[in-house]
Image: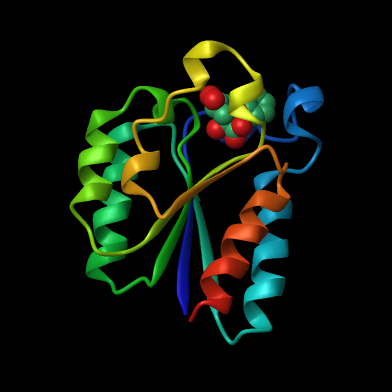
Amino acid sequence: MKILCLNGPNLNRLGKREPEIYGYETLEHIEAQLQHVAKQFDSTVSMKQSNTEGQLIDWIYEAEDQGIDAIIFNPGAYTHTSIALRDCIAGIETPVVEVHISNVHKREAFRHHSYLAPVCVGQITGLGTFGYEAALRMFLQSN
Ligand code: CA2
C-alpha cells in the first residue's frame, strides 16, 4: 500500500514546544516509526506538513489522483474550523483517518467539535504519537 501521512498547522513545532501536551517526539521521529512499520508490510509512507489550508487540500487531491491508498491526517486546529477540508475529504474516495495526539475531548470546548470526523473513516484521539501508528496498522491490516 502507499500511504500519505498529512499534518496541519503548527505540527512542524512538534517535540519542540508544549511537551506536556504533545510529548517530545518530532514529526521526523514519527515518520521514521511509520516507515519502519510500513516496511514490514511491503508498504510505503510519505510524510507532509503544511501550515496552509489550501496546500493541505491540494495534497489530498494529489494523493487521490496519484492512487495513494489511504491518508492519515492530523489536521491540527483546522479540525475545528475547516469546512473547506471537510468538503475536500467528502469528495474523494481515498479513505482518511483523523488523528490527534492529545485527547481533544479533555481539552477546551472548542476542540470537542470536528468538522472532519463525519467524513473520515474514524477519529483517533489521545493516544499520543502512537495514534499515527494505530491508524497505519489499521489500514495495513485491513488490506
Ligand atoms: O492533539 C492534536 O494532535 C491536535 O490536532 C493538535 C493541534 C490542536 O489545535 C488540535 O486541537 C489537536 C495543535 C497543533 C499544535 O502543535 C504543536 C505542537 C507542538 C508544539 C506546539 C504546537
Q: Nearer the viewer, residue 34 or 113?
A: 113
- The way the protein has been coloured in the rendering is rainbow
Residue 80 occupies quadrant: top left
Q: Residue at x 48, y 30 (%)?
A: 9
- The quarter of the image that holds ligand 1 is top right
Residue 70 against residue 84 in the figure, above or below: below
Most extreme residue toward the bottom is 42
Q: Residue at x 36, y 38 (%)?
A: 116
Residue 67 in the image, given as x and y percentages of width and height = 30, 74
Q: Which of 52 and 88 is in front in this view?
A: 88
Residue 68 in the image, given as x and y percentages of width and height = 36, 71
Q: Which residue is drawn at 81% across and 24% down?
A: 20
Q: Is residue 138 left or right of residue 121?
A: right
Total number of numbered discs in the rendering? 0
Residue 117 occupies quadrant: top left
Q: Which of 30 and 133 is in front in this view?
A: 133
